[in-house]
Amino acid sequence: MSRLSKEELVKIQEGLQKDGFYVLRGLIPTETLDEAEEHLDTIVDSLAQHQLDNNVTESLFRNEPFDKRLVHVYRDRLNEAPKIFRSELHLAGLFPIFFNENLLDIAEHVLGTSEIRLYPNYTCRPKVPGGTERHTVLWHQDAGYTGSKTWHALNDYTDEQLDAALRCMVNVWIPLVDVTANNGCMQFIPGSHRNGVQPHVERKEYLELDADIMKTCVHQAVDMDAKRGDVILFGQYLYHCGLPNKSDTVRWSLDFRFQDAAASTLRKEPGHLARSKVSPDAVVKDSDHWCRLELGGENPK
Ligand SMILES: O=C(O)CCC(=O)C(=O)O
């Protein structure tokens, strides 16, 4: 894997500062994506087996392609299909993506520290067709979730801790299939990261940015089309949503965040150390190590 140059890292940081996001084309090698896909398919194996055991389906659909299999497993019940996987992601095939050296170089450059954690919120989204409410992500800022006490956050953080936690995070979104508006890509409002954290309303499946705020800017929304292996970077403050999937295949993607390991996660989970000069022995070493760990890292006793 060739490493990004200093010039490229500077350009990424400038793009993030200016627009609130940056897209890297073809960063993740095909073999890495193929391996991830193979391991994610084992999650689909379990779901298919469960449906078969309960006489809900007549087959495991093992020969169906990765972007079709869940459609068969959940045929006529697409609104029951899982919207995310999290605890299931301690799979060997995901280590090379979550701990990709180029992504860690970007995090180190953008966050200005060698102490980087994988934030305890890493997600795989199998966005099934049908445009269901469950699979259509409403306009939001990730900061809305990170600080939300009814969602994941601890009850006793200070405003200073919240501000520090949000400012030293970079979000990574990777499509495992080509994505367009038709199969439910994200939409961004460029420059919206400059507005700070805005009010969100609790909806059934997701939080939603205040409707009056969205009225003023939704006409600026851009479709974040991307190819398998591209990487979309953005920050906690950017207004974004995930469109409904109107295609007949599953829109698979991964999203995760890197954070300065010195900041609070604002959760009970500490995350997983991904790079460190201070405590190199505490870094997640390899895929075997990753498979032995649990979602979000060991909770402090
Ligand atoms: O994948 C999507 O459609 C939306 C993802 C998203 O909102 C996020 O990663 O914060």
Image (cartoon, helix red, strand yellow):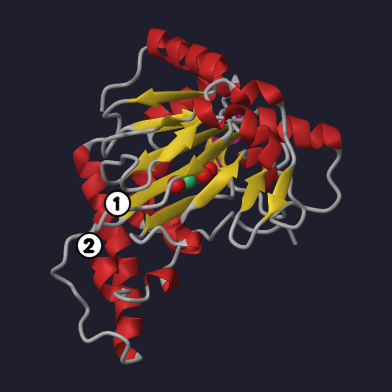
CA gap, disc 1 and disc 2: 16 Å
- Mark 1, other Cα within 10 Å: few <14 / some 14–19 / many ≥20: many
Q: Quadrant of residue 26?
A: top left
Residue shown at 59% from the left, 54% from the top:
296
Q: Is residue 255 magenta?
A: no
The one nearer the camera, 141 or 298, is 141
> Mark 1 belongs to which amino acid?
Ala
Left or right, residue 52 beside residue 98: left
Which residue position holds label 1?
36
Badge 1 element: helix
Residue 248 visible in image: yes
Left or right, residue 74 beside residue 19: left
Q: Which residues are magenta?
A: 278-282
Badge 2 element: loop
Question: Which residue is farthest left?
Answer: 63
Residue shown at 75% from the left, 40% from the top:
199
Left or right, residue 166 beside residue 241: right
> Mark 2 belongs to which amino acid?
Lys
Question: Which comes before the other along the chain, label 1 or label 2?
Answer: 1
From the image, give the main secondary structure of the stretch colored magenta. helix
The one nearer the camera, 87 or 183, is 183
Which residue position holds label 2?
68
